[in-house]
Amino acid sequence: MATEDELLTYGSDEIADEKSDHDPSRSPRSSAKITDSNAELQEVKAREIIDACRRRDIESLQALAESPGGFITDELRQQAWPVLLGLPVRFPSDEVENPSSDRHEVVRLTASEFIDDAWKDLKPHKEEEQVKLDVARAFVYYPNYESDQERTHQKNELSDLILSILRRYPYLCYFQGYHDICQVFLLVLPPALRSPAVARLSALRIRDFMLPNLSAAIAQLRLIPDILRAADPALWRHLPQTEPFFALSGTLTMYAHDVQSLGEIARLFDVLLAREPVFSVYMFAQIVIGRRAELFAVPSDEPEMLHSILSKLPQPLDVDRLVAGACRLLADHPPESLRSWRCGVSPNSVLKTARSTRDCAGQSLEVGAYFFGQQILELQREERKKKVIDALWRYRKPAKAVGVAVMFGVLAYWIRRSAVSNGVAAGPVRYMTALVSAWWQEF
C-alpha cells in the first residue's frame, strides 16, 4: 500500500526465482545463481523505468509496461502512472544536468488544485447514495486487513476519493464499477496523487463510461466481434451473434471488478495506462481467443453456456501472456481496419480522442470536458432520432392509410378527368372506389 506522503521511494526487494523452490533437480548453488541473475535483470529494468519517467519517455514506458512483470513494484508505479496520465509532476533530477541513478526520488505535484479538501464544500453529486452503497462492498478480495477499523478507514478514504472527483467535475456520471477502479489507485498511489490521477483517467481515458447512458460503452464492445471475425473466423462463427455484453464488466472496470489479486490488477493497469484505451477491448478479444478450445467444447446451439464462459475471466489469469497476445492482436488487426470502428465509434469517443497515449497525456481536463459535451449532444440527437422512429412505427398504420388514401384520391381524380374528357365509361372510377373501400377496412 502507498505511504502517507509524497515520497516515491524505491526499495531493493529481492526477486525470488519462482521455479527454484519447486524443481528438486536444481542444486542450492544453481538456484542461488538463478535468483541473483533474475534480481540483476529486475534491477536493470527498474533503472530503465526510472530513467524513462525522468525523461517523460512515453514510448519507452509503453515497452516496459508490455514486457513481463510490467513496472514490477508499486513504488515504481507511483512514478510511472502519473507520467503516463500526464500529471504535472516534478522530479528533483529535472534540475540536475547529470542525475544519478539513485532510486530514492522525491516527486511532487506542481498543480495545487487537489491539495486541499475544498471539494467537501461543493454541491453533492446526484449519485452519492449509489457511491455509498458500492463503497460498502469494496475491498472484498484484497488487501487482507488486520482489523475492521483499518478496513473502515480505507473505505472512508475510497469514498472521499470518488466524491472529490464527482463534486469537482459534476458533469461526470458515476457508474457501478467505478469504485473498483478507484480502489486500485487508492492502494497503489500516495494520497497527493490519487485525485489528480483519477480525474485525468475519468475525463480523458474512461469518459465513454461516465456518460448518462451506456451507448458509448456498448459501441466499444461491438468492436470485439469484428476483431474475432478478422483474427479467428471459425471461432467468431461458433459464438452467438448477439450483443457482446459478456465483456461489459471487464472493459467497464478496467478488469478491476473481476481480477482478485492486487498484484495482477496493478500489473494490468501498467499496460492499460501505457497503451491507448482501445487496448482494453483487444485484451478482452484475446481472452476469448485464448479460451478457444474451451468454447469449442460447448455446442454453438447453447448460447447461455457460451455466454457464461465468456463473462468470467479464466482462473488463473496469465497476465504476461495475455498482454503479449493483445499487443500482437492490435498490431495485426488495428481498429481502423474494423467496420464497427468506422461506422459505430464516435469521433468524440476516448477510443479516438486518446488514440495516442502521448497525445492524451498532453490533453487538459478542459479538453476532456469539451469532448464530453460533444458526446452529450450526440446522445441527444440519437434520442430525438429514436423518438421520431418510434413515433413513425407506432403510427405506421394511420400514416400508411393517409398516404395511400392520398395516392388513390389523386389517381381517382385523374381517371375521372380522363373519363370525362375522353368519354370513357365510369367503370374504372367505381372500381378504384371499391378498391379503396376494401383496403380501408383492413385498418
Image (spheres, grey):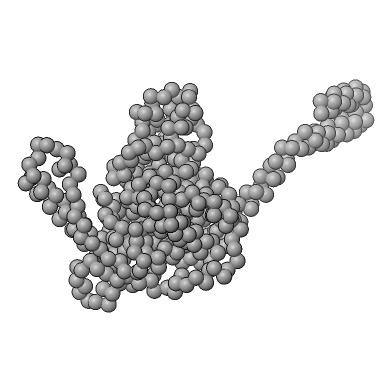
Estimate the x, y position of residue 396 in percent, counting from the top left.
75, 36
Estimate the x, y position of residue 73 in percent, counting from the top left.
28, 56
Q: Quadrant of residue 421?
A: top right
Estimate the x, y position of residue 221 in percent, counting from the top left.
48, 43
Q: Residue at x 85, y 25 (%)?
A: 441
Regarding residue 385, the answer to whether it shows in the image is yes
Q: Is residue 437 above or below residue 394?
A: above
Answer with left or right where residue 70 lies relative to residue 333. left
Q: Residue at x 38, y 45 (%)?
A: 260
Regarding residue 356, the answer to whether it shows in the image is no
Q: Residue at x 59, y 61 (%)?
A: 125
Image quarter in which the N terminus is found: bottom left
* Nearest to the observer: residue 160 or residue 328: 160
Image quarter in which the C terminus is found: top right
Estimate the x, y position of residue 329 in percent, counting from the top left.
34, 42
Q: How many marks?
A: 0
